[in-house]
Amino acid sequence: MTAASGDSQADRWGVLLAAAQLGDADAYRAFLNAIIPFVRAIARRRCWSEDMAENVVQDALLTVHRVRHTYQPGRPVAPWIAAIVTRRSIDAARKRGRIGRQEVFNEVAYETFADPRANEPLEADASRTLAQMVGGLSRGQREAIELVKLREMSLAEASEFSGQSVASLKVNIHRAMKKLRISLPKEPPE
Amino acid sequence: MTVSPIDKIINELASDVGPVRPLRAPALRALLAIAAIGLAAAFAIVVLGDVSGLRNRYAGREALLALEMLAMLSTGVLAIVAAFVVSIPGRSKRWIAAPIPFLALWLLFSGLGCYDDLVRRGGVGWELGESIHCLRFVAATSAVFGPLLIWRLARAKPINPLPVALLGGLGIAATSVLVLQFFHPFAVTFIDLAVHLVAIMIVVGVVGLVNRRALAPA
Protein backbone atom coordinates (compact mmCIF):
# COMPACT_ATOMS: atom_id res chain seq x y z
CA MET A 1 0.00 0.00 0.00
CA THR A 2 1.53 3.35 -1.03
CA ALA A 3 1.38 6.38 1.24
CA ALA A 4 -1.03 8.13 -1.12
CA SER A 5 -3.40 5.17 -1.37
CA GLY A 6 -3.16 4.72 2.39
CA ASP A 7 -4.11 8.36 2.91
CA SER A 8 -7.06 8.19 0.56
CA GLN A 9 -8.21 4.96 2.23
CA ALA A 10 -8.00 6.61 5.66
CA ASP A 11 -9.86 9.63 4.28
CA ARG A 12 -12.59 7.28 3.12
CA TRP A 13 -12.74 5.70 6.59
CA GLY A 14 -13.15 9.19 8.04
CA VAL A 15 -16.05 9.94 5.69
CA LEU A 16 -17.73 6.61 6.54
CA LEU A 17 -17.31 7.16 10.28
CA ALA A 18 -18.70 10.69 10.01
CA ALA A 19 -21.73 9.23 8.20
CA ALA A 20 -22.03 6.57 10.93
CA GLN A 21 -22.13 9.34 13.54
CA LEU A 22 -25.25 10.57 11.77
CA GLY A 23 -26.79 7.10 12.16
CA ASP A 24 -26.02 5.61 8.69
CA ALA A 25 -25.88 1.85 9.44
CA ASP A 26 -24.56 0.89 5.97
CA ALA A 27 -21.72 3.40 6.22
CA TYR A 28 -20.92 2.10 9.68
CA ARG A 29 -20.88 -1.53 8.50
CA ALA A 30 -18.62 -0.55 5.60
CA PHE A 31 -16.35 1.38 7.98
CA LEU A 32 -16.02 -1.51 10.45
CA ASN A 33 -15.37 -4.02 7.65
CA ALA A 34 -12.80 -1.71 6.05
CA ILE A 35 -10.78 -1.16 9.21
CA ILE A 36 -10.55 -4.84 10.22
CA PRO A 37 -7.19 -5.52 8.43
CA PHE A 38 -5.69 -2.37 9.99
CA VAL A 39 -7.01 -3.28 13.46
CA ARG A 40 -5.86 -6.88 13.10
CA ALA A 41 -2.36 -5.81 11.98
CA ILE A 42 -1.90 -3.64 15.10
CA ALA A 43 -3.34 -6.33 17.38
CA ARG A 44 -1.07 -9.02 15.93
CA ARG A 45 1.98 -6.80 16.37
CA ARG A 46 1.17 -6.30 20.05
CA CYS A 47 -0.18 -9.73 21.02
CA TRP A 48 1.78 -12.95 21.38
CA SER A 49 -0.93 -15.33 20.23
CA GLU A 50 -3.49 -15.41 17.46
CA ASP A 51 -6.29 -16.02 19.99
CA MET A 52 -5.31 -13.01 22.03
CA ALA A 53 -5.09 -10.84 18.88
CA GLU A 54 -8.59 -11.90 17.79
CA ASN A 55 -9.96 -11.07 21.25
CA VAL A 56 -8.29 -7.65 21.05
CA VAL A 57 -9.83 -7.07 17.58
CA GLN A 58 -13.30 -7.84 18.96
CA ASP A 59 -12.74 -5.70 22.03
CA ALA A 60 -11.40 -2.84 19.90
CA LEU A 61 -14.51 -2.93 17.67
CA LEU A 62 -16.75 -2.68 20.74
CA THR A 63 -14.66 0.24 22.02
CA VAL A 64 -14.82 1.99 18.64
CA HIS A 65 -18.59 1.70 18.90
CA ARG A 66 -18.71 3.13 22.44
CA VAL A 67 -16.41 6.08 21.71
CA ARG A 68 -17.43 6.84 18.13
CA HIS A 69 -18.64 10.26 19.31
CA THR A 70 -15.04 11.23 20.15
CA TYR A 71 -13.99 11.19 16.48
CA GLN A 72 -13.97 14.70 15.10
CA PRO A 73 -15.01 14.65 11.42
CA GLY A 74 -12.23 15.95 9.21
CA ARG A 75 -9.42 14.79 11.47
CA PRO A 76 -7.19 11.80 10.60
CA VAL A 77 -9.01 8.63 11.60
CA ALA A 78 -6.08 6.16 11.56
CA PRO A 79 -4.38 7.51 14.76
CA TRP A 80 -7.77 7.44 16.48
CA ILE A 81 -8.28 3.76 15.62
CA ALA A 82 -4.64 2.88 16.34
CA ALA A 83 -4.84 4.43 19.83
CA ILE A 84 -7.95 2.38 20.63
CA VAL A 85 -6.44 -0.91 19.43
CA THR A 86 -3.15 -0.22 21.23
CA ARG A 87 -4.94 0.53 24.49
CA ARG A 88 -7.05 -2.62 24.22
CA SER A 89 -3.89 -4.67 23.50
CA ILE A 90 -2.25 -3.24 26.64
CA ASP A 91 -5.38 -3.97 28.67
CA ALA A 92 -5.46 -7.56 27.35
CA ALA A 93 -1.77 -8.08 28.20
CA ARG A 94 -2.32 -6.71 31.73
CA LYS A 95 -5.39 -8.86 32.23
CA ARG A 96 -3.43 -11.92 31.14
CA GLY A 97 -0.63 -10.92 33.52
CA ARG A 98 -3.10 -10.60 36.40
CA ILE A 99 -4.61 -14.00 35.66
CA GLY A 100 -1.12 -15.47 35.43
CA ARG A 101 -0.23 -14.08 38.85
CA GLN A 102 -3.39 -15.45 40.45
CA GLU A 103 -3.30 -18.91 38.94
CA VAL A 104 -0.65 -21.31 40.21
CA PHE A 105 0.71 -24.06 38.04
CA ASN A 106 0.57 -27.26 40.00
CA GLU A 107 2.61 -30.04 38.42
CA VAL A 108 0.99 -32.68 40.61
CA ALA A 109 -2.48 -31.66 39.47
CA TYR A 110 -1.62 -32.62 35.91
CA GLU A 111 0.33 -35.76 36.79
CA THR A 112 -1.14 -38.89 35.37
CA PHE A 113 -0.07 -42.35 34.43
CA ALA A 114 0.61 -43.73 30.97
CA ASP A 115 -1.74 -46.63 31.48
CA PRO A 116 -5.30 -45.21 31.52
CA ARG A 117 -6.40 -47.99 33.91
CA ALA A 118 -3.90 -46.71 36.51
CA ASN A 119 -5.89 -43.47 36.73
CA GLU A 120 -9.21 -45.16 37.33
CA PRO A 121 -9.11 -45.26 41.15
CA LEU A 122 -8.45 -41.47 41.23
CA GLU A 123 -11.21 -40.79 38.72
CA ALA A 124 -13.56 -42.98 40.72
CA ASP A 125 -12.70 -41.02 43.87
CA ALA A 126 -13.29 -37.73 42.11
CA SER A 127 -16.62 -38.89 40.72
CA ARG A 128 -17.70 -40.14 44.14
CA THR A 129 -16.75 -36.83 45.79
CA LEU A 130 -18.57 -34.87 43.11
CA ALA A 131 -21.64 -37.09 43.37
CA GLN A 132 -21.66 -36.60 47.15
CA MET A 133 -21.33 -32.82 46.79
CA VAL A 134 -24.12 -32.59 44.22
CA GLY A 135 -26.22 -34.99 46.31
CA GLY A 136 -26.25 -32.39 49.08
CA LEU A 137 -28.10 -29.90 46.85
CA SER A 138 -31.84 -29.45 46.69
CA ARG A 139 -33.69 -30.80 43.65
CA GLY A 140 -34.05 -27.34 42.07
CA GLN A 141 -30.42 -26.45 42.70
CA ARG A 142 -29.22 -29.79 41.29
CA GLU A 143 -31.34 -29.32 38.19
CA ALA A 144 -30.12 -25.73 37.68
CA ILE A 145 -26.45 -26.74 38.01
CA GLU A 146 -26.85 -29.74 35.74
CA LEU A 147 -28.64 -27.88 32.95
CA VAL A 148 -26.74 -24.56 32.95
CA LYS A 149 -23.27 -25.53 34.14
CA LEU A 150 -22.82 -29.13 33.09
CA ARG A 151 -24.98 -29.30 29.96
CA GLU A 152 -24.13 -25.66 29.10
CA MET A 153 -27.70 -24.66 28.26
CA SER A 154 -28.58 -20.97 28.16
CA LEU A 155 -30.77 -19.72 31.01
CA ALA A 156 -33.70 -19.43 28.59
CA GLU A 157 -33.24 -23.01 27.36
CA ALA A 158 -32.84 -24.34 30.90
CA SER A 159 -35.95 -22.45 31.96
CA GLU A 160 -37.98 -23.93 29.12
CA PHE A 161 -36.62 -27.43 29.82
CA SER A 162 -37.09 -27.43 33.59
CA GLY A 163 -40.09 -25.16 34.02
CA GLN A 164 -38.14 -23.01 36.51
CA SER A 165 -38.17 -19.27 35.84
CA VAL A 166 -34.89 -17.59 34.77
CA ALA A 167 -34.80 -15.70 38.07
CA SER A 168 -35.21 -18.86 40.16
CA LEU A 169 -32.57 -20.63 38.02
CA LYS A 170 -30.16 -17.79 38.78
CA VAL A 171 -30.94 -17.97 42.52
CA ASN A 172 -30.58 -21.76 42.53
CA ILE A 173 -27.24 -21.62 40.70
CA HIS A 174 -25.95 -18.98 43.09
CA ARG A 175 -27.01 -20.98 46.17
CA ALA A 176 -25.74 -24.24 44.72
CA MET A 177 -22.32 -22.76 43.91
CA LYS A 178 -22.11 -21.41 47.44
CA LYS A 179 -22.97 -24.81 48.91
CA LEU A 180 -20.53 -26.61 46.59
CA ARG A 181 -17.76 -24.20 47.53
CA ILE A 182 -18.33 -24.89 51.22
CA SER A 183 -18.44 -28.65 50.72
CA LEU A 184 -15.20 -28.71 48.67
CA PRO A 185 -12.47 -30.75 50.43
CA LYS A 186 -10.14 -28.28 52.19
CA GLU A 187 -6.92 -30.13 51.30
CA PRO A 188 -6.08 -30.63 47.62
CA PRO A 189 -5.74 -34.31 46.75
CA GLU A 190 -2.15 -35.61 47.03
CA MET B 1 -22.17 -20.82 5.89
CA THR B 2 -20.96 -20.00 9.38
CA VAL B 3 -20.62 -16.38 10.45
CA SER B 4 -17.33 -15.48 12.12
CA PRO B 5 -17.47 -13.82 15.58
CA ILE B 6 -16.13 -10.59 14.06
CA ASP B 7 -18.80 -10.52 11.35
CA LYS B 8 -21.40 -11.17 14.04
CA ILE B 9 -20.10 -8.24 16.12
CA ILE B 10 -20.03 -5.94 13.07
CA ASN B 11 -23.63 -6.86 12.20
CA GLU B 12 -24.78 -6.28 15.77
CA LEU B 13 -22.96 -2.95 16.06
CA ALA B 14 -24.20 -1.74 12.67
CA SER B 15 -27.79 -2.64 13.54
CA ASP B 16 -27.39 -0.84 16.88
CA VAL B 17 -25.89 2.35 15.43
CA GLY B 18 -27.82 5.52 16.14
CA PRO B 19 -26.90 9.14 15.58
CA VAL B 20 -24.34 10.55 18.01
CA ARG B 21 -23.21 14.14 18.36
CA PRO B 22 -19.44 14.34 17.88
CA LEU B 23 -17.65 16.01 20.77
CA ARG B 24 -16.35 19.48 20.09
CA ALA B 25 -12.59 20.14 19.95
CA PRO B 26 -11.05 19.22 23.33
CA ALA B 27 -9.41 22.64 23.73
CA LEU B 28 -12.79 24.33 23.28
CA ARG B 29 -14.45 21.98 25.78
CA ALA B 30 -11.61 22.64 28.21
CA LEU B 31 -11.98 26.40 27.85
CA LEU B 32 -15.72 26.15 28.53
CA ALA B 33 -15.06 24.12 31.69
CA ILE B 34 -12.33 26.57 32.76
CA ALA B 35 -14.69 29.48 32.14
CA ALA B 36 -17.38 27.86 34.35
CA ILE B 37 -14.87 27.13 37.14
CA GLY B 38 -13.33 30.61 36.73
CA LEU B 39 -16.73 32.30 37.04
CA ALA B 40 -17.56 30.35 40.22
CA ALA B 41 -14.10 31.12 41.66
CA ALA B 42 -14.36 34.83 40.74
CA PHE B 43 -17.79 35.04 42.37
CA ALA B 44 -16.47 33.44 45.58
CA ILE B 45 -13.44 35.76 45.62
CA VAL B 46 -15.49 38.93 45.04
CA VAL B 47 -18.14 37.99 47.63
CA LEU B 48 -16.02 36.29 50.29
CA GLY B 49 -12.34 36.90 49.46
CA ASP B 50 -9.86 39.26 51.05
CA VAL B 51 -8.15 40.95 48.08
CA SER B 52 -6.88 43.96 50.07
CA GLY B 53 -5.43 41.59 52.70
CA LEU B 54 -3.59 39.76 49.93
CA ARG B 55 -2.18 43.07 48.66
CA ASN B 56 -1.02 44.02 52.14
CA ARG B 57 0.65 40.69 52.76
CA TYR B 58 2.61 40.96 49.55
CA ALA B 59 3.32 44.73 49.73
CA GLY B 60 6.69 45.35 48.11
CA ARG B 61 6.70 41.81 46.63
CA GLU B 62 3.98 42.27 44.02
CA ALA B 63 6.12 40.94 41.18
CA LEU B 64 6.79 37.69 43.03
CA LEU B 65 3.10 37.34 43.88
CA ALA B 66 2.14 37.94 40.25
CA LEU B 67 4.64 35.35 39.02
CA GLU B 68 3.53 32.82 41.61
CA MET B 69 -0.13 33.25 40.77
CA LEU B 70 0.57 33.19 37.04
CA ALA B 71 2.44 29.91 37.48
CA MET B 72 -0.50 28.48 39.51
CA LEU B 73 -3.00 29.64 36.90
CA SER B 74 -0.92 28.21 34.05
CA THR B 75 -0.57 24.88 35.88
CA GLY B 76 -4.33 24.68 36.45
CA VAL B 77 -5.32 25.77 32.94
CA LEU B 78 -2.78 23.54 31.17
CA ALA B 79 -3.63 20.53 33.36
CA ILE B 80 -7.33 20.91 32.54
CA VAL B 81 -6.69 21.41 28.81
CA ALA B 82 -4.33 18.41 28.82
CA ALA B 83 -6.96 16.27 30.60
CA PHE B 84 -9.50 17.07 27.86
CA VAL B 85 -6.98 16.47 25.07
CA VAL B 86 -5.68 13.11 26.33
CA SER B 87 -9.23 11.88 26.97
CA ILE B 88 -9.63 11.66 23.17
CA PRO B 89 -8.03 8.60 21.50
CA GLY B 90 -5.09 9.32 19.23
CA ARG B 91 -4.15 12.75 20.56
CA SER B 92 -0.55 13.51 21.47
CA LYS B 93 0.54 12.13 24.84
CA ARG B 94 3.00 15.01 25.14
CA TRP B 95 0.15 16.99 26.62
CA ILE B 96 0.58 14.99 29.82
CA ALA B 97 3.84 16.86 30.47
CA ALA B 98 2.44 20.31 29.60
CA PRO B 99 1.66 21.52 33.15
CA ILE B 100 4.88 20.17 34.72
CA PRO B 101 7.22 23.15 33.93
CA PHE B 102 4.62 25.55 35.36
CA LEU B 103 4.19 23.36 38.44
CA ALA B 104 7.96 23.57 38.94
CA LEU B 105 7.87 27.38 38.51
CA TRP B 106 4.98 27.61 40.97
CA LEU B 107 6.95 25.66 43.59
CA LEU B 108 10.04 27.79 42.86
CA PHE B 109 8.20 31.12 43.27
CA SER B 110 6.31 29.88 46.33
CA GLY B 111 9.59 28.67 47.81
CA LEU B 112 11.17 32.07 47.17
CA GLY B 113 8.20 33.76 48.83
CA CYS B 114 8.47 31.45 51.84
CA TYR B 115 12.21 32.10 52.13
CA ASP B 116 11.59 35.83 51.92
CA ASP B 117 8.95 35.52 54.64
CA LEU B 118 11.26 33.48 56.82
CA VAL B 119 13.99 36.14 56.53
CA ARG B 120 11.52 38.94 57.34
CA ARG B 121 9.61 37.31 60.17
CA GLY B 122 12.00 34.72 61.54
CA GLY B 123 10.43 31.52 62.82
CA VAL B 124 6.89 32.96 63.11
CA GLY B 125 4.31 31.08 61.13
CA TRP B 126 5.86 27.64 61.47
CA GLU B 127 2.90 26.31 63.45
CA LEU B 128 0.77 23.71 61.74
CA GLY B 129 -2.46 24.92 63.40
CA GLU B 130 -3.35 27.58 60.81
CA SER B 131 -2.21 25.54 57.84
CA ILE B 132 -4.79 22.82 58.49
CA HIS B 133 -7.43 25.37 57.40
CA CYS B 134 -5.66 25.56 54.03
CA LEU B 135 -5.95 21.80 53.64
CA ARG B 136 -9.66 21.94 54.47
CA PHE B 137 -10.16 24.87 52.09
CA VAL B 138 -8.42 23.12 49.17
CA ALA B 139 -10.35 19.90 49.84
CA ALA B 140 -13.68 21.75 50.05
CA THR B 141 -13.06 23.89 46.94
CA SER B 142 -11.92 20.81 45.00
CA ALA B 143 -15.08 19.01 46.11
CA VAL B 144 -17.08 21.81 44.44
CA PHE B 145 -15.04 22.13 41.21
CA GLY B 146 -14.12 18.43 40.92
CA PRO B 147 -17.52 16.93 40.07
CA LEU B 148 -18.14 19.58 37.40
CA LEU B 149 -14.82 18.88 35.69
CA ILE B 150 -15.13 15.11 36.00
CA TRP B 151 -18.65 15.24 34.58
CA ARG B 152 -17.36 17.09 31.51
CA LEU B 153 -14.33 14.79 31.13
CA ALA B 154 -16.49 11.66 31.42
CA ARG B 155 -18.32 12.65 28.21
CA ALA B 156 -15.34 11.29 26.26
CA LYS B 157 -15.46 7.87 28.03
CA PRO B 158 -11.64 7.93 28.06
CA ILE B 159 -10.10 4.61 27.03
CA ASN B 160 -7.18 5.21 29.43
CA PRO B 161 -8.77 7.06 32.34
CA LEU B 162 -5.82 7.31 34.75
CA PRO B 163 -3.82 10.16 33.11
CA VAL B 164 -7.08 12.00 32.45
CA ALA B 165 -8.01 11.73 36.13
CA LEU B 166 -4.55 12.73 37.38
CA LEU B 167 -4.39 15.77 35.09
CA GLY B 168 -7.95 16.75 36.01
CA GLY B 169 -7.08 16.36 39.69
CA LEU B 170 -4.01 18.57 39.27
CA GLY B 171 -6.08 21.18 37.44
CA ILE B 172 -8.69 21.23 40.21
CA ALA B 173 -6.07 21.34 42.99
CA ALA B 174 -4.10 24.15 41.31
CA THR B 175 -7.28 26.19 40.83
CA SER B 176 -8.25 25.61 44.47
CA VAL B 177 -4.84 26.74 45.75
CA LEU B 178 -5.07 29.82 43.49
CA VAL B 179 -8.46 30.69 45.01
CA LEU B 180 -7.02 30.01 48.47
CA GLN B 181 -4.57 32.88 47.99
CA PHE B 182 -7.50 35.30 48.27
CA PHE B 183 -8.61 33.75 51.56
CA HIS B 184 -5.21 33.19 53.13
CA PRO B 185 -4.97 35.10 56.40
CA PHE B 186 -1.15 35.11 56.39
CA ALA B 187 1.82 35.06 54.04
CA VAL B 188 2.76 31.59 52.81
CA THR B 189 5.38 29.88 54.95
CA PHE B 190 7.28 26.68 54.24
CA ILE B 191 4.80 24.79 56.41
CA ASP B 192 1.92 26.27 54.39
CA LEU B 193 3.64 25.35 51.17
CA ALA B 194 4.12 21.79 52.41
CA VAL B 195 0.45 21.63 53.45
CA HIS B 196 -0.60 23.01 50.05
CA LEU B 197 1.46 20.29 48.39
CA VAL B 198 -0.11 17.64 50.61
CA ALA B 199 -3.56 19.03 49.75
CA ILE B 200 -2.73 18.88 46.02
CA MET B 201 -1.47 15.32 46.38
CA ILE B 202 -4.63 14.33 48.27
CA VAL B 203 -6.89 15.84 45.58
CA VAL B 204 -4.88 14.31 42.72
CA GLY B 205 -4.74 10.98 44.59
CA VAL B 206 -8.46 10.88 45.30
CA VAL B 207 -9.38 11.72 41.70
CA GLY B 208 -6.79 9.18 40.51
CA LEU B 209 -8.26 6.50 42.77
CA VAL B 210 -11.82 7.03 41.59
CA ASN B 211 -10.81 7.36 37.92
CA ARG B 212 -12.55 4.20 36.69
CA ARG B 213 -15.74 4.82 38.64
CA ALA B 214 -15.91 8.57 37.95
CA LEU B 215 -14.87 8.78 34.29
CA ALA B 216 -16.97 5.87 32.98
CA PRO B 217 -14.19 4.66 30.66
CA ALA B 218 -15.05 2.70 27.51
Image: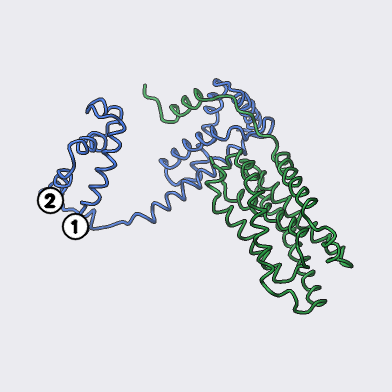
Chain colours: A blue, B green
Report x, y in % for residue A184.
21, 52
For residue A139, what is the image quadrant? top left
Q: In this view, does A187 lie above or below A143?
A: below
Label 1 Cα neighbours within 10 Å, binned few <14 / some 14-19 / many ≥20: few
The answer as to whether the residues below labels 2 and 1 share one chain is yes
Quadrant, the N terminus of chain B? top left
Report x, y in % for residue B74.
76, 53
Q: What residue type is labelled 2?
A: Asp
User: Is B49 in front, or is A150?
Assistant: B49
Looking at the image, which residue is at 26% across and 43% down? A175
Query: On the rendered structure, is B86 left or right of A94?
Result: right
Query: Chain letter of disc 1?
Result: A
Q: Are marks 2 and 1 in contact (CB under 8 Å)?
A: yes
Which of the labelled discs sits on residue B116, or is there none?
Answer: none
Looking at the image, which residue is at 32% across and 57% down? A104
Report x, y in % for residue B50.
80, 58
Most distant residue in the front direction: B47
Query: Chain letter of disc 2?
Result: A
Q: Is residue B58 above or below residue A102?
A: below
Which of the labelled discs sits on residue A125, or is there none?
Answer: 2
The secondary structure type at the circle numbered 1 is: loop
Q: Which of marks 2 and 1 is nearer the N terminus?
A: 2
Q: Which amino acid does label 1 sit on?
A: Pro
Report x, y in % for residue B183.
76, 59
Distance between the alpha carbons at the discs numbered 2 and 1: 10 Å
Looking at the image, which residue is at 67% across and 52% down? B172
Label 2 Cα neighbours within 10 Å, binned few <14 / some 14-19 / many ≥20: few
Which of the labelled discs sits on residue A189, or is there none?
Answer: 1
The secondary structure type at the circle numbered 2 is: helix
